[in-house]
Image (cartoon, rainbow, N blue to C red):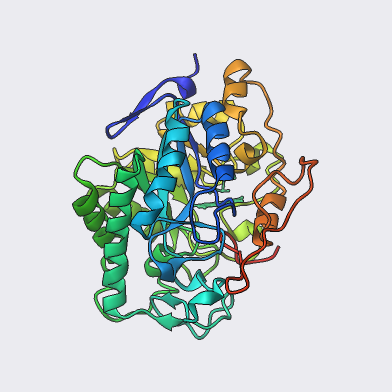
Amino acid sequence: MSILFESARLKNMTLRNRFVRSATYDGMSDPTGQVTDRQIKLIAGLAEGGVGLIVTAITYVHPSGQVSSFMNSIAEDSCIPGLQKLARAAHQRGAKIAVQLYHGGREARFVKTRGQLPIGPSVIADDPFYRWNYREMTTREIEDVVQAFGRAARRAREAGFDAVQIHGAHGYLFSQFLSPFTNRREDAWGGSLENRLRLHREVYASVRDHAGPDYPVGIKLGVEDGFKGGLTFSEGMKAALMLAETGYDALEISGGVRGEKYEGTEYRTKINIPSREGYFRAWTGEIRKKTDTPVIAVGGLKSIAMMEEMIRGGEADFISLCRPLISEPGLIRSWEADPGKKPRCVYCNQCLEAVHRGIPLSCVAFSKGEQTVLKAPQRNVGANPEGTHEN
Ligand SMILES: Cc1cc2nc3c(=O)[nH]c(=O)nc-3n(C[C@H](O)[C@H](O)[C@H](O)COP(=O)(O)O)c2cc1C
C-alpha cells in the first residue's frame, strides 16, 4: 500500500492517511456566522470521501476580523452547538477535523455593518496592491485579538474539534504582521523578525492557556510574499523554524501577502505540466529538512507519484489539497482504488471567482446546476474572503 494511505500521527491525533483538506472558504454560513446544513453536508462528503484531516473554512475569532457575511464565527459561545454538528459529521465518517482560526486584519473590509475601519499593523501609504482605508491597531487591540484566539481555541475544543489551525498566510492579519512591507511598527510588535512574529507567539501561548497543553495547534504560514520588497523566503523560513521552536505542532507552508495576478498568490493556475505542480515544494522541503515538527505541503499537488516522493524523501509529512477536493470530494477514495486516476480539477479558479461574488462554493467548471447568489441582509453586504485581486 502507498505510504500516502498509511495512518500517521500528528501530536495526539491518529489520522487514517496522509491527506489533509486544506482550509476552504465556502460562503455557506448563515449571515450570523452559524453553521448551516449545507456545510454539514459538505464536511460529511469530504469525510465520506476519505480525507484524513479536514481543515474547515476560515472562521473568525473576533468581529474586527470578519471578512465576509457568509463565513463562520467562533467568536461567541453561541457558535459551539453548530460547530459541534460539523465536528460530528467528520467523526462519524472516520475523519479528524480542525477549525481554521482567522482574523482578516486590513482585509476585513467587506462587512460594512461594523461601521468601523478595518485594522492592521501599520498603514502603508505606498502600497501598490492596497487602496482602501484602514487604521493602525493599538497595543490594546492587538492584546484583545490575542485573547480572542485563545477563547476561540477553547470553544473549538468544547465543540469536539481535534485541533485548531491558525491562518498565518495569504495576506491576512498574521501575514500583515510578519511582512516587513506591511508591518512598519516601531514598538514591540514590529521591526526585527522576532517582533514581527510576536503576534504568532503570543497567540500560541494564549491558545495553550485556553485549550490545554495536549491540544494540537498548527499554523498555515506564508513564507514569502508574492512581490518584490515583501517577505523573503530566507526570513520566512527562519520564521517557520522559530514557530516550530515556539511549540506549534504542524506547519502548513504557503504564500504570504499576495502579489499581482494569480501567479503571485497561493492559488496558481495552469497546473498542466509536471513542472507547474507542487509549486511550494522547494520551500516545504527546505523547511522540513531543518525541523522535526510535522510539515504539511500544499499548492498544486495532483499526482500520487510526486506526493509519495515528497513523503518518502522527507520533504513533507502530510499532503494538503483544496481545489481538487472542491471538484471531487471523493478523490482520496478514488485514488486509493486507482492511484493512476487523474484529478478532474483544471485549476481554473472559477470556484474562487464565484465565492468572491457571493455564490456558495462549487466546482463551476463541471457543475451543471444553477448557481444562486446568496442574499445578504441589507445591513450586511459583501463577500471576498480569499482573494483580493481580480485576475
Ligand atoms: C475557493 C477557495 C477558498 C479558499 N479558502 C481558504 C481558506 O479559507 N483558508 C486558507 O488558508 N486557504 C484557503 N484557500 C487556499 C487553499 O487552501 C490552498 O492553499 C490553495 O488553493 C492551494 O491548494 P490547491 O492547489 O490544492 O488548491 C482557498 C482556495 C480556494 C480556491
Q: Is residue 190 visible?
A: no
Q: Quadrant of residue 152?
A: bottom left
Residue 369 drawn above or below residue 50: below
* Residue 326 position in % (x across, y down): 63, 41
* Residue 188 position in % (x across, y down): 24, 75
Nearer to us in this view, 375 or 314: 375
Q: Is residue 115 visible?
A: yes
Q: Quadrant of residue 105?
A: bottom left
Horizontal placement of 120 versus 388: left or right?
left
Where is the C terminus found, in terms of image quarters?
Answer: bottom right
Number of callouts in the render? 0
Horizontal placement of 30 versus 78: left or right?
right
Nearer to us in this view, 43 or 201: 43
Residue at the spot 65% in from the left edge and 52% down from the top edge: 360
Residue at the spot 44% in from the left edge and 62% down from the top edge: 232
Residue at the spot 53% in from the left edge and 69% down from the top edge: 228
Residue 11 drawn above or below residue 30: above
* Residue 369 position in % (x across, y down): 78, 43
Residue at the spot 77% in from the left edge and 40% down from the top edge: 366
Nearer to us in this view, 115 or 363: 115
Outermost residue, bottom side = 125
Horizontal placement of 206 versus 51: left or right?
left
Residue 76 drawn above or below residue 324: below
